[in-house]
Image (cartoon, rainbow, N blue to C red):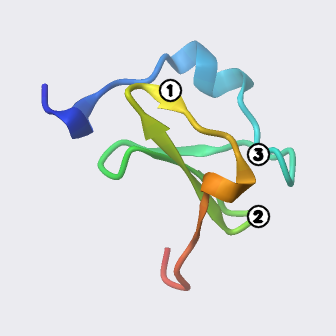
């Protein structure tokens, strides 16, 4: 597996929510991000660990 192919625990995905909107997150395996469409943010996953800090999130593009 390459760096961008790390898997995240499905049980973790079930309990994690967006820190802003409190809605479910979508796992983007290719980009290694957890996406909150409600908040318009993508939270990075580094070394298999979701970084759920708003300051670390990137704004979503219009077409995402």
Of pointers 2 and 3, the one earlier in the residue sequence: 3
Q: Taking 46 as reference, is 41 left or right?
A: right
- Which residue occupies 61% across, 54% down? 56
Residue beneath the point at 35% across and 24% down: 7
Label 1 crowd (10 A; few <14 / some 14-19 / many >=20): few
Foreground tag (3 vs 1): 1
State the residue position of label 2: 39
CA–CA distance in space, label 2 to label 3: 8 Å
Q: Please provide percent x and percent y for residue 24.
A: 73, 42
Residues at circles 2 and 1 in contact by the CB criterion of under 8 Å: no
The kind of secondary structure element at disc 3 is loop
Disc 3/disc 1 C-alpha distance (Å): 15 Å
Count of numbered circles in the view: 3
Where residue 33 appears, as percent x and y from the top left, is 47, 47
Q: Earlier in the sequence, mark 2 or mark 1?
A: 2
C-alpha gap between disc 2 and disc 1: 20 Å
Extreme residue toward the bottom, this view: 62
State which tag comes first along the sequence, 3 or 1: 3
User: Residue at label 1?
Assistant: 49
Number of other residues with Cα within 10 Å of mark 3, as a class: few under 14, some 14 to 19, many 20 or more: many
Percent x, y of residue 57: 61, 57
Q: Quadrant of residue 12?
A: top right
Q: Are marks 2 and 3 in contact (CB under 8 Å)?
A: yes
19 or 53: nearer the eye?
53
Q: Where is mark 3, residue-wise?
A: 18
């Amino acid at each position: 597996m390459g760096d961008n192919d790390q898997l995240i625990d499905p049980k973790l995905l079930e309990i994690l929510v967006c820190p802003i909107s409190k809605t479910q997150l979508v796992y983007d395996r290719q980009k290694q991000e957890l996406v909150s469409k409600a908040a318009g943010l993508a939270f990075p996953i580094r070394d298999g660990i979701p970084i759920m800090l708003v300051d670390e999130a990137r704004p979503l593009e219009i077409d995402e």
